[in-house]
């Protein structure tokens, strides 16, 4: 057989090639951010296929998000360069486990059309159990039980295997309620998120035949972001890989950021013990970021004690320093980021202008080099061009501006000078899609969303299932769920009296009782109740209409089995012939998109909002439209519901250029030319919880998150903080993050906030009169005082937002206190100053005890 071309190998460095070409046996790639782990993993899939090691569907590749899976699929397709039959199993742990569990659901007492509960449903169910067990929900919140159960499931503990110490949690009832909860889930033919993995682990452990079947089936296993697997995922992988041991895991201990969700960084550290003789590959060249950015990140992560420690280097030049800027408050920060993004977009930001110089120079040099190579002659497609550039080891091959590349080629062809055309291409500009804002907490997003809506800046929010959390969307989906899964009691409870059908608590209780007495689902229970006339009046009539509706919708949406005539005649026993037929699935009466619309209309749900006079109603109707639209990209309602319950990331599909807003957690594995990291303040980032915790664990995880954040940036990384922040409606004064202190001076450019010295920060001219000059003068850059100065200057000179309550606080009081002064604080009351450090006071409050507070938030009682 002819060897296939393998250009993808040429794009790899020797270490990466080692990881790609050692196809058999265990391989561990342990390396820092941006070193090309994911790239190598993708190449490995392609190589497995090219070397005919496995058929596509015998390869199992696990990614951390759905988005990453999708990207990897596309890349594999592109890199292969030829058609393959079928696709590798490529997805998140959850997505893969749903598929498997549907095949074997009966082994854990479920039917294959089980529903996946979201956290809301889960909580509702637990509340019912808690209340039935006569436990005081106030003292023992159901939410607490929910997180215990999640934790157990992450650790692969079924109720039967729960250690006594755990079972005794939650007022000694934890184990018992966990068991009841699992029983109830089975009755509902449902499982929660954690069950997807737990059930599969249970099946593999209890049914060796099933396990053996998949061990044979999945001949090669690949796992990205291995540092964030939890125990259940780890067991699942180990069981599957036990036979052939063809498992390749890649990860970075410095990027382990899901400890709070049960991830065990230990999994990656013990890989070599689990798989003796594992081939361990380390990568050190970072291809993503410029040197200042990489060094800044490396310096921050060095603050962690518990790490393997690795050094990264980059060949892509010093680049820009990480920019640091303080603001008055969160709104001001959002305003500044908005302006800065516009400046990057139209090229007017000083940093964008500098970029033009570097890029243009590099381009000219490259074009000169290629001129001699005659590399750009006789091309007739952009792909050919890129291939040719690649052959010539040109960095232009990685350029994503196809117009420019093409123009470059044709000008070369015509013997024209390239220079004028290059200028036109605005190398100082950043498309919106090249820019991301990565926040620590999702409540930070609102300020950016509001600001961007105001100035008309296109953005998308990725990460939280925000859209699907909205009331009207959840209602609509409950309707779909009832139609798809008749046993889905939680969904039925949600919609039975929405819109109002005169089925209040009493009627609903009757339905519950009837269902329980007959051991059937609520829908069936309701049917029996009506037949037995156990309910009357308007409610009975409306309920009957709803039940008829459910039947009708289900019928309209299901594919009928039809008999199709075949061309050949079949010979039957007695020698006679007869028209041969085959049974096949016909077309349902309605496509699922129309069906969804019909359900919402006929159920009266659309009308409910049309008749609603509240200001939110029009928006809700818009959202419902969007929901129906979203269905178009799915084959059926069930697939859609599955997707939604799995939305780890609801990245919108549209290719429009938009700024991305997402959480740091969600950004793992991604990269953007320009990254904004707002809200670097103690209590927000690192989070309050991690600071309150004893020991380093929480704080170290936050620091890894900082490392993840900075290393997402290719060219521009901007860190900001605010002096004041409104969190859940309360104004709080903030101190800059301790992580800011951990950046080293030579990698950081301090920007002057606008309004402070009468000009927009950014250019180096800003420094001579700005903070940096002051900082240099006092040589306090790295001292604790420096960051406090940042905080102060950030809050002093800002144009003060009118609506800001904090702004109204008298600033003249700052640092005018001396030890011994009596002061008043709005929250803590009266006290005496015992220590002063910059603008931070230690106060011994009469009621609240000793606290550190920011000076501008206390007043002198005599004033
Ligand atoms: P992270 O830890 O953040 O997930 P990673 O190690 O998975 O990072 P990749 O995302 O695979 O890194 O690669 C980072 C960037 O470097 C990508 O843009 C990738 O295309 C590029 N890259 C990786 N390896 C090479 C290489 N050998 N030559 C050129 N570019 C490379
Ligand atoms: Mg990666």
Image (tube, rainbow, N blue to C red):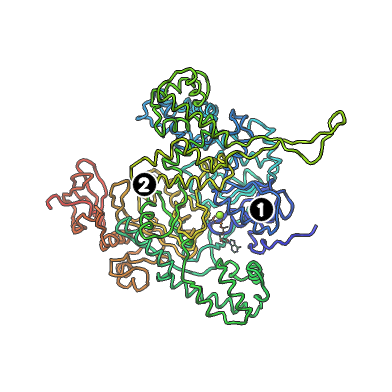
Up/down of 427 relative to 827, above or below: below
Crowding near the residue tagged with mark 1, few <14, some 14–19, many ≥20 C-alpha atoms within 10 Å: many
Which numbered dot is residue 379?
none
Circle 2 or circle 1, nearest the eye: 1
Choose top left, top right, bottom left or bottom right for residue 314.
Answer: bottom right
Q: Is residue 59 left or right of residue 621?
A: right
Crowding near the residue tagged with mark 2, few <14, some 14–19, many ≥20 C-alpha atoms within 10 Å: some
Ligand 2 location (quadrant): bottom right
**Residue 249 at x, y = what percent?**
61, 49
Q: Is residue 786 visible?
A: yes
Choose top left, top right, bottom left or bottom right for residue 555.
Answer: top right
Which structural element holds mark 2? helix
Q: CA distance from mark 2 to mark 1?
A: 42 Å
Q: Is residue 119 left or right of residue 754?
A: right
Nearest the viewer among 414 and 849 is 414
Up/down of 41 relative to 427, above or below: above
Would you name the residue on which mark 2 appears?
688
Q: Is residue 235 visible?
A: no
Would you name the residue on which mark 1 appears?
45
Q: Is residue 683 left or right of residue 260?
A: left
**Residue 21 at x, y = what percent?**
69, 56
């Amino acid at each position: 057989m002819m060897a296939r071309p393998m250009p993808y190998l040429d794009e790899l460095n020797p270490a990466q090639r080692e990881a790609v070409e050692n196809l058999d046996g265990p391989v561990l790639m342990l390396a820092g951010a941006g070193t090309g782990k994911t790239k190598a993993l993708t190449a490995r899939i392609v190589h497995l296929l090219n070397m005919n090691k496995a058929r596509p569907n015998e390869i199992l590749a696990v990614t951390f998000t759905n988005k990453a899976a999708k990207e990897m699929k596309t890349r594999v397709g592109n890199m292969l360069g030829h058609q393959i039959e079928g696709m590798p199993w490529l997805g998140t742990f959850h997505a893969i486990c749903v598929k498997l569990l549907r095949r074997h659901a009966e082994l854990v007492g479920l039917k294959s059309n089980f529903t996946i509960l979201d956290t809301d449903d889960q909580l509702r169910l637990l509340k019912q159990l808690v209340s039935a067990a006569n436990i005081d929900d106030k003292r023992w919140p159901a939410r607490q039980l929910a997180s215990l159960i999640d934790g157990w499931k992450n650790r692969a503990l079924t109720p039967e295997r729960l250690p006594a110490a755990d079972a005794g949690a939650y007022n000694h009832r934890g184990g018992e309620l966990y068991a009841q909860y699992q029983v109830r889930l089975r009755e509902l033919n449902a499982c929660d998120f954690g069950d997807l993995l737990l059930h599969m682990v249970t099946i593999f452990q209890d049914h060796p035949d099933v396990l053996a079947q998949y061990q044979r089936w999945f001949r090669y296993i690949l796992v990205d972001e291995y540092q964030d697997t939890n125990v259940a995922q780890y067991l699942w992988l180990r069981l599957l890989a036990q036979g052939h041991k063809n498992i390749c895991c890649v990860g970075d201990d410095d990027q382990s950021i899901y400890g709070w969700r049960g991830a065990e960084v230990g999994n990656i550290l013990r890989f070599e013990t689990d798989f003796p003789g594992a081939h361990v590959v380390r990568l050190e060249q970072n291809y993503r970021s410029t040197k200042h950015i990489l060094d800044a990140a490396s310096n921050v992560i060095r603050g962690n004690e518990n790490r393997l420690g690795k050094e990264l280097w980059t060949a892509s030049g010093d680049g820009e320093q990480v920019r640091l800027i303080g603001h008055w408050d969160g709104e001001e920060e959002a305003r500044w980021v908005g302006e800065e993004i516009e400046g990057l977009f139209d090229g007017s930001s000083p940093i964008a202008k500098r970029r033009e110089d570097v890029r243009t120079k590099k381009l000219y040099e490259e074009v000169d080099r290629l001129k001699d190579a005659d590399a750009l002659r006789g091309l007739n497609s952009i792909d050919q061009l890129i291939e040719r550039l690649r052959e010539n080891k040109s960095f232009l091959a990685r350029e994503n501006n196809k117009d420019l590349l093409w123009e470059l080629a044709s000008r070369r062809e015509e013997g024209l000078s390239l220079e004028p055309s290059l200028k036109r291409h605005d190398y100082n500009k950043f498309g919106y899609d090249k820019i991301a804002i990565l926040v620590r907490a999702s409540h930070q997003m609102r300020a950016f969303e509001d600001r961007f809506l105001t100035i008309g800046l296109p953005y998308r929010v990725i990460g939280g299932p925000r859209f699907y959390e909205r009331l009207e969307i959840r209602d609509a989906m409950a309707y779909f769920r009832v139609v798809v899964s008749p046993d889905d009691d939680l969904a039925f409870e949600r919609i039975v009296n929405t819109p109002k059908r005169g089925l209040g608590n009493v009627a609903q209780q009757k339905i519950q009782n009837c269902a329980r007495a007959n051991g059937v689902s609520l829908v069936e229970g309701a049917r029996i109740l009506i037949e037995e006339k156990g309910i009357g009046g308007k409610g009975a009539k409306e309920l009957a209409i709803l039940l008829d509706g459910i039947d009708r919708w289900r019928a309209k949406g299901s594919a009928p089995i039809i008999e199709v005539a075949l061309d050949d005649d079949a010979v039957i026993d007695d020698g006679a012939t007869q028209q041969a037929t085959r049974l096949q699935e016909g077309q349902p009466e309605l496509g699922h998109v129309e069906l969804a619309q019909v359900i919402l209309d006929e159920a009266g749900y659309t009308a409910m909002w049309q008749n609603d006079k509240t200001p939110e109603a029009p928006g809700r109707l818009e959202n419902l439209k969007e929901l129906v639209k979203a269905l178009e990209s799915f084959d059926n309602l069930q697939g859609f519901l599955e997707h939604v319950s799995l939305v780890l990331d609801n990245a919108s599909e549209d290719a429009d250029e938009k700024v991305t807003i997402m959480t740091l957690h969600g950004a793992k594995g991604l990269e953007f030319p320009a990254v904004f990291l707002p809200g670097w303040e103690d209590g927000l980032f690192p989070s309050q919880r991690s600071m309150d915790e004893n020991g380093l664990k929480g704080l170290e995880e936050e620091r890894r998150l900082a490392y993840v954040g900075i290393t997402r940036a290719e060219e521009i990384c901007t860190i900001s903080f605010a002096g004041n922040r409104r969190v859940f409606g309360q104004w709080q004064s903030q101190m800059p993050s301790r992580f800011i202190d951990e950046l080293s001076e030579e990698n950081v450019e301090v920007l002057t906030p606008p309004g402070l010295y009468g000009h927009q920060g950014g250019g180096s001219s800003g420094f001579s009169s700005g903070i940096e000059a002051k900082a240099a003068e006092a040589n306090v850059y790295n001292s604790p005082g420096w960051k406090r100065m940042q905080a102060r200057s950030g809050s002093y000179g800002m144009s003060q937002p009118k609506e800001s309550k904090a702004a109204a606080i008298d600033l003249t009081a700052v640092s005018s206190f001396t030890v011994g002064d009596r002061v008043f604080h709005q929250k803590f009351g009266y006290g005496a100053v015992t220590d002063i450090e910059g603008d931070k006071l230690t106060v011994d409050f009469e009621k609240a005890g000793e606290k550190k507070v920011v000076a501008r938030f206390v007043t002198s009682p005599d004033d």
